[in-house]
Amino acid sequence: MAQVAFTNEFRKGLKVLLDNDEPFTIVEFQHVKPGKGGAFVRTRLKSLVTGNVLDRTFKSGDKVEIPDMEEKEMQYMYKEGVNYYFMDVNTYDQLFVEEENLGDATNYLKEGLTINVSFYKGKAIGVDLPNFVDMVVTKTEPGMKGDTAQNATKPAELESGHVIQVPLFLEEGDMVKIDTRTGDYITRVSK
């Protein structure tokens, strides 16, 4: 029998099956207890297959099925066209994940990065990045002597091609720590 979750077990990141066996992850949820009538749970769900976001309301006590998903530790190798290639660190099998299934993760992928790849019904549908990654700044305006204004930033391109805002003192070739959940610069990393 398939695993189920009741509405009181909802949490951010919980994966559930809805609408014709499609896996979703809970992005936001809110338990509501109105003065009149029964309690319910408002959720915002993101499809793990298509990336579509939908709002759904569940009555208190409803149950939803949990998808039978598998996660494998894999290493990012390279990109070819719209396909990103990964290698299983245990079996050395290689596979690709299409760019549309990766979403914002493409901004933080670099060769050799080890991540978890999610599989549903044998097909790779997405990745779980570490919370922080270290990347090299490949392009930015040079910092000027005396640029010490508080909280002043400038755009900088990372080795993945993604552009973020960084402090004025950073230069090309500097290694920076990035929060993959928000896309924010955290600190400069010594090499």
Image: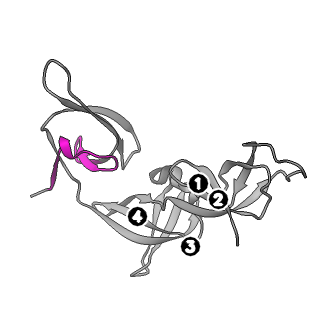
Identify which residue, 139 or 152, lies in the foreground: 152
Element under label 4? strand
From which residue to which does the magenta span run?
Answer: 3-23
Q: Are marks 1 and 2 in contact (CB under 8 Å)?
A: yes
> Which residue position is annotated with label 4?
117
Residue sitting at 74 percent across and 63 percent down? 174
Give the CA separation, mark 1 to mark 2: 6 Å
Residue sitting at 77 percent across and 64 percent down? 173
Q: Residue furthest right?
A: 145
Element under label 3? loop
**Residue 107 shows which numbered tag?**
1
Residue 24 % position (x, y) = 31, 46
Residue 183's place in the image compared with 172, above or below, is above
Residue 28's place in the image compared with 21, above or below, is above
- Upstream in the sequence, badge 3 or badge 1? 1
Residue 89's place in the image compared with 110, above or below, is below
The C terminus sits in image quarter: bottom right
> Which residue position is annotated with label 2?
160
Quarter of the rendering containing residue 58: top left
- Upstream in the sequence, badge 3 or badge 4? 3
Residue sitting at 44 percent across and 71 percent down? 74
Q: Residue furthest bottom?
A: 91
